[in-house]
Image (cartoon, rainbow, N blue to C red):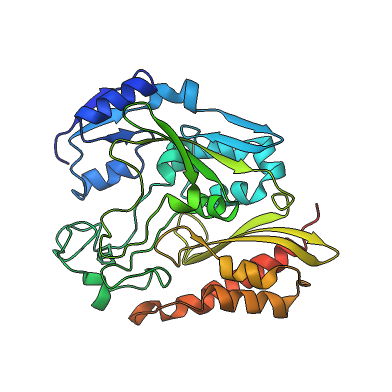
């Protein structure tokens, strides 16, 4: 690991000031960042430790408008919260199936949504060709090992998958993310707009401004949040990333879909909202035939490349199963 500096921010204003004069990289749990620093993928310069902001950005709140999650809430804390478990089970499920208990005790929610792809060429600097790590260098995965990589939202410059779980639940539920700039300006954007498609700039992964800090998330209340779940398919049953996953939230009336919210993970370059599938379901009786039609719509634009040819079918089956299981939930 290369030497790096460390500054401790006393509060949000201090974090902004420090970010403006350093690399603008924040340290919370450090479970991804330190990993990538050790692998020499990221040269961090000086990190800004924001763990002292937990008093202002580390709480969980729930009211009639929805659920608010501070960015410094630890994954394990959110997973165990009674209101999350009761009213937002898809968030509980996604957190419970992520990483390991030790990592969930350390990792913050704000850091978790910014985790990096597991593309092996990105994580190994001995490979020269990686547009995400070194812009303009090419993409070794195109003709290399790409079994885990994305089939939705790809470009000719990068097919790296987004590996997280919690973010897939957030995108399905139509959450917002709260941000604070280095000058103290606050803004709120749809979580769906936080991550960018790779296009021809795969090294720019989010719409965050330089030094902008994620301070929290707001998940709106809705009749669909209780009938919600997350299904994840992976090579091994724990401590593994999704090959395909589906976050589903349904409002049903007598078996007919009033509202369906769907997020997909493990198959796309960013946390993926399956709007086309939601449109197929709206206003119709949910059965296996309809769920299959929705899953086909979700993957209609899939592009496969060599080893990842199995992903559209796995993704479809995962979504069908999630929809049918959500419909059967006993509320
Ligand atoms: Fe790099 Fe993206 Fe290609 Fe992987 S898929 S080698 S992250 S450019």
**Does 90 sit above or below residue 294?**
above
Residue at figure coordinates x 18%, y 48% from the top left = 40
Residue 144 visible in the shown view:
no
Going by the picture, which residue comes out furthest to the right? Answer: 254
Q: In this orientation, does residue 251 appear?
A: yes
From the viewer's perspective, is 147 left or right of 156? right
| Horizontal and vertical percent position of residue 51 | 39, 26
Query: Dividing the image into four equal quarters, which quarter contains ligand 1?
Result: bottom left
Q: Is residue 221 left or right of 108 when viewed as pictured?
A: right
| Near-viewer residue (200 or 57) | 200
* Residue 216 placement (x, y as % from top left): 49, 35
Give the x, y percent position of residue 1. Answer: 17, 41
Name the residue located 49 percent from the left edge and 41 percent from the top edge: 177
Horizontal side of residue 120 vs 220, given as left or right: left
Which of the 4 image quadrants contains residue 209? Answer: top left
Using residue 29 as the reference point, say whether residue 130 is left or right of it: left
Q: Quadrant of residue 12?
A: top left
Question: At 44% from the left edge and 42% from the top edge, which residue is drawn?
Answer: 103
Image coords of residue 226 (percent x, y): 72, 49
Q: Residue furthest top?
A: 10
Total number of numbered discs in the rendering: 0
């Amino acid at each position: 690991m290369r030497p790096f500096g460390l500054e401790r921010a006393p509060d949000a204003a201090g974090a902004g000031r420090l970010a403006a004069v350093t690399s603008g990289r924040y340290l919370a749990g450090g479970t991804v960042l330190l990993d990538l620093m050790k692998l020499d993928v990221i040269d961090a310069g000086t990190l800004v430790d924001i763990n002292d902001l937990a008093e202002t950005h580390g709480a969980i709140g729930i009211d009639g408008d929805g659920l608010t999650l501070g960015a410094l809430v630890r994954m394990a804390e959110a997973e165990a919260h009674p209101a999350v478990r009761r009213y937002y089970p898809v968030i509980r499920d996604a957190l419970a199936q992520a990483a390991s208990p030790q990592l969930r005790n350390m990792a913050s929610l704000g850091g978790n949504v910014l985790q990096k792809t597991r593309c092996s060429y990105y994580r190994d600097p001995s490979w020269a060709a990686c547009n995400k790590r070194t812009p303009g260098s090419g993409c070794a995965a195109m003709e290399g090992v790409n079994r885990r990589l994305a089939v939705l939202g790809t470009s000719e410059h990068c097919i790296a998958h987004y590996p997280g779980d919690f973010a897939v639940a957030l995108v399905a539920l139509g959450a917002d993310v709260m941000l604070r700039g280095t000058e103290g300006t606050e803004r709120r954007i749809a979580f769906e707009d936080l991550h960018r498609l790779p296009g021809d700039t795969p090294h720019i992964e989010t719409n965050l401004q330089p030094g902008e800090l994620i301070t929290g998330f707001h998940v709106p209340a809705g009749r669909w949040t209780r009938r919600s779940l997350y299904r994840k398919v992976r090579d091994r049953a724990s401590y593994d990333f999704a090959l395909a996953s589906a976050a589903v939230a349904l409002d049903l009336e007598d078996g007919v879909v009033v509202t369906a919210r769907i997020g997909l993970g493990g198959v796309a370059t960013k946390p993926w909202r399956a709007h086309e599938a939601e449109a197929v379901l709206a206003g119709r009786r949910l059965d296996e035939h309809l769920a299959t039609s929705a899953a086909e719509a979700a993957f209609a634009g899939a592009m496969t490349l060599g080893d990842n040819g199995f992903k559209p079918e796995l993704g479809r089956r995962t979504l069908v199963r999630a929809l049918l299981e959500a419909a059967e939930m006993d509320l």
